[in-house]
Image (cartoon, helix red, strand yellow):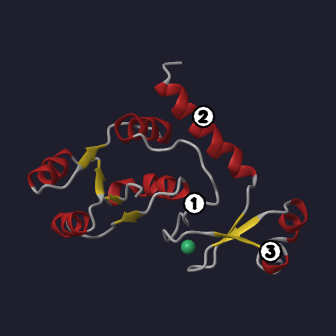
Amino acid sequence: MDMEFAVDGMLGKLARWLRMLGYDTKYFNNMDDDEILKVASEEKRILLTRDYQFFRKASTHGVRAIFIEGRTHAERLAELSRQLNIRLEIDINMSRCPKCNTRIRQANKEEVKDRVPKSTYNLYDEFWVCPRCNQVYWKGSHWKKINNTLNHARQINSGK
Ligand SMILES: [Zn+2]
């Protein structure tokens, strides 16, 4: 089974990245440390945090934790790839909704017709939807940026 993650309140963007990469990731905003540790422990999730005290505390509670030091998304993803060997490539058919962590599914073009801007509908042929929150996704202009960041992360790890 794939690794699953628990991400603390300071790393919301990283949670979105991990979901896009296909990893089941719970993100805890406004939850205290003990509650987060309880969930991570019960569900065998790897805790990701930027809080060194919390990182230490997790270890003493038997929760596997990674202390995230990188400043940019690329650095953080590179770091996780080095430590845990996470994928640094998105297979969108494996992706989870960045908003709600539900596995997204490919949609028929017709199905999203009234849910995306007309220009988008005309420009793209492939769409994905989240069955839970109904968000529609497509490989728009942001897709290039996403791949640039992942390329950069791979370059960091190959020492370029
Ligand atoms: Zn969703």
The kind of residue tagged 2 is: Asn
Q: CA distance from mark 2 to mark 3?
A: 30 Å
Q: Earlier in the sequence, mark 1 or mark 2?
A: 1
Disc 2 packing (10 Å; few <14; some 14–19; many ≥20) = some
Would you say 4 lies left or right of 88 here?
left
Residue shown at the point (43%, 62%) measured from the top left: 24
Q: Nearer the viewer, mark 1 or mark 2?
A: 1
- Classify the position of the C terminus by image quarter: top right
Marked residue nearer the N-terminal end (3 or 1): 1
Residue 21 lies, in percent from the top left, at 53, 53
Gap between marks 1 and 2 measured at Cα: 18 Å
- Which of the 4 image quarters holds residue 44? bottom left
What x and y, as percent, mark residue 36? 23, 66
Reading the image, the residue beneath label 3 is 108
In terms of secondary structure, where does tag 2 sit? Answer: helix
Which residue carries the number 2 mark? 151
Residue 95: give its label.
Answer: 1
Which residue is at a point 32% across and 37% down the rendered structure image?
69
Mark 2 near ligand 1 (CB under 8 Å)? no
Looking at numbered disc 1 in the image, what kind of residue is underneath it? Ser
CB under 8 Å between discs 3 and 1: no
Nearer to me, 94 or 33: 94
Which class describes the residues within 10 Å of circle 1: few (<14), some (14-19), or many (20+)?
many
Residue 121: x %, y % from top left: 86, 68
Amino acid type, callout 3: Asn
Tag nearer the camera, 2 or 3: 3
